[in-house]
Image (cartoon, coloured by chain):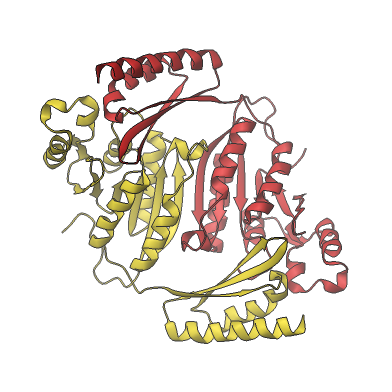
Chain colours: A red, B yellow
Amino acid sequence: MPSNAVDPDKSSYNAALLVIGNEILSGRTEDKNINWIAKKLVEKGITFSEVRVVPDNAPRVIAAVRELSGLYDYLFTTGGIGPTHDDITAECVALAFDAPLEQNKEALALLVAHYGGSEHLNPGRLKMAQIPRGADLIPNPVSGAPGFILRNVHVMAGVPRIMQAMLDHVLSTLKGGALVHSCTVTSQLPESRIAEGLADLQKRWPNVEIGSYPHFQAGNFGVSLVLRSTDQDALAKAEADVKALVMALEGAA
Amino acid sequence: MPSNAVDPDKSSYNAALLVIGNEILSGRTEDKNINWIAKKLVEKGITFSEVRVVPDNAPRVIAAVRELSGLYDYLFTTGGIGPTHDDITAECVALAFDAPLEQNKEALALLVAHYGGSEHLNPGRLKMAQIPRGADLIPNPVSGAPGFILRNVHVMAGVPRIMQAMLDHVLSTLKGGALVHSCTVTSQLPESRIAEGLADLQKRWPNVEIGSYPHFQAGNFGVSLVLRSTDQDALAKAEADVKALVMALEGAA
């Protein structure tokens, strides 16, 4: 059984992301991974249920890995798998599951190949071959040092280019559920004029999630009404109802 | 005592952000608030300790508000304070603290003024005057509907322009601690060549947080070494040590 296997009879899957990074919390770096991962999970039919951002602090990372791994089908982590002293993710995931952290032969071979010989493996580079026992590696086509999968935890790099390559690999190994389809109805009406009718339509179409997102552009109010459902027939009918609501209110404006 | 008061003898303060929004988790919207808030908290001397993103789901929001409010000095929330059925933040914060949700006279007056008379207050607009009892309002100079502060929870809009105005107001009311100063040393060396020396410098300067952030631009490796501390003297000395390390390694390359 692969280490990331889940119940094969499940029809829906959810996931959380743990962003490990002082640089996000200090404001130095603007996260680019949350939105990328969100879109990829939609394409795969996996519900994205939670994101947490925590600092490079071992007790915090260990606690979050344990909790989120238990709450969701899949946990993804980004950040903290490099060669420096502030890269503590592999150690923390090992501690979270009481797995020994040890030199992984396959990871070592990848690093020897990437750096052009074992004589170039200094302590920092050797650190990147320290992987919890029992983990499967995630290839890193950009910079050599692999990510890994232990149980339902998928440990990826924080640098977006590397994370994106690792995520493609990871998602190809995961089961997803029914795809969520969506459509958007936009209007220049203020959200507060649509609210009452929209609440009624949400009751009429309980298996369609109706979200209302106001915007202010060039001094004008407007709203995007986003409908999402795995049921394409209900989605089309709900969309027609929302369009009729908007047209009636625009006509009355 | 204002509802957001904390122990006046504290010398450091931390904060968490709870992002309430299906639109972030579905990938429809890329969050722009985390980085903005992170930078503003640094300027105020408040340590940004955690971010969570949860869906528009009442039990999830209530549980997160309770937990994060208890763990940190300040909790900020973004999203879910508009007029539509999917705006559930005020109700959830009220439930989190067993405070009744009731029509707030000051909020009602703001909405009457914004919409040009009480005859324009439909049920959606009246919903935005429903505020937990005991809360202080946060003015909304953009679209009328206020945020609010209950205990240490600061409830703000999700639309960035409105959130930014609300945050300026909120931060003017909060106590901060010692300011964190930072400096950055960049190098074209790969991170893995600097790792060992950097770990030694981190041990030498325990009150300076040294972070190492690799980047790949135009096919080249490089690294930004970011030093952060409330102690400017230690920061300057640690920066000199890091620069010396980088120069020595670049000379040996």
Q: To which quarter of the image does residue B241 belong?
A: bottom right
User: If the image is split into quadrants, where does the N terminus of chain A sit?
Assistant: top right
- Which residue is at 54% across, 44% downward? A35
Residue drawn at x 52%, y 87% as measured from the top left: B237
From the top left corner, tell me how far across and down residue B143 is, in percent.
Answer: 25, 40
Quadrant where the C terminus of chain A sits is top left
Name the residue nearer the viewer: A216 or B54.
Answer: A216
Residue B5, by quadrant, is bottom left
Name the side, left or right, on which A228 lies relative to B196: left
Q: Is residue B153 visible?
A: no
Q: Position of residue A137 (x, y in %)?
A: 76, 51
Q: Is residue A234 left or right of residue A46?
A: left
Which x, y percent locates residue A13? 60, 32
Q: Find the residue positioned furthest to the front.
A: A218
Is B119 rendered above or below residue A99? Answer: above
**Up-down: is B28 above or below A64?**
above
Q: Nearer the viewer, residue B235 or A66?
A: B235
Relative to B100, residue B240 above or below: below
Instruction: Residue at 56% x, 40% y: name it.
Output: A38
- Residue B199 lies, in percent from the top left, at 63, 77
Q: Is residue A11 visible?
A: yes
In the figure, is residue A86 to the left or right of B70? right
**Where, by quadrant of the figure, is residue B175 drawn?**
bottom left
